Image (cartoon, rainbow, N blue to C red):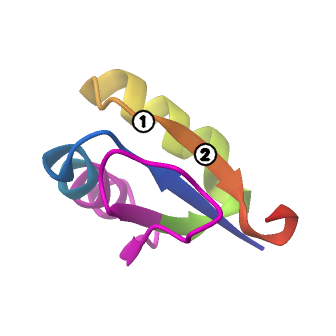
Amino acid sequence: MACLATFRTTSMALMFERACRAAGVSARIAPVPRKISSSCGLACEFPCEERQKVEAVTAAKKIDVAAIHNMDQL
């Protein structure tokens, strides 16, 4: 199951991807689906099983995530 993190800026999306990969989480940049509103056109996809780890990494690195969506629920 995949989750999608959205961001207000492109730089936050890129920081998120780098931080996730450094923490051992498989993450990839993806376009934001039309169903989701976002100021930035980029999102980052990662396994939902890693959500707790991702949230800890983003808090520690002060990465501003607009929202995290479960792709199965879109």
Density class for disc 1 (Cα within 10 Å; few <14, some 14-19, many ≥20) is some
The quadrant in which residue 36 appears is bottom right
User: Helix, strand or loop at disc 1?
Assistant: loop
Kind of residue at disc 1: Val
Q: Residue pushed farthest left?
A: 11
Kind of residue at disc 2: Ile
Q: Is residue 67 magenta?
A: no
| Mark drawn on residue 65 | 1
* Image height of 26 relative to 41, above or below: below
The quadrant in which residue 31 appears is bottom left
* Image height of 62 relative to 23, above or below: above
Question: Which one is nearer the viewer's eye here, 48 or 74?
Answer: 74
The magenta stretch is 16-44
Q: Quadrant of the N terminus?
A: bottom right
Q: Residue 28: x and y, percent?
A: 38, 75
Q: Going 64% across and 39% down the picture, which residue do you hit? A: 52
User: Helix, strand or loop at disc 2?
Assistant: strand
Q: Are marks 2 and 1 in contact (CB under 8 Å)?
A: yes
Confirm whether residue 34 shows in the render. Answer: yes
Tally the marks.
Answer: 2
Density class for disc 2 (Cα within 10 Å; few <14, some 14-19, many ≥20) is some
Q: Give the labeled residue for mark 2.
A: 68
Q: Residue 74: x and y, percent?
A: 79, 65
| Mark drawn on residue 48 | none
The quadrant in which residue 57 appears is top left
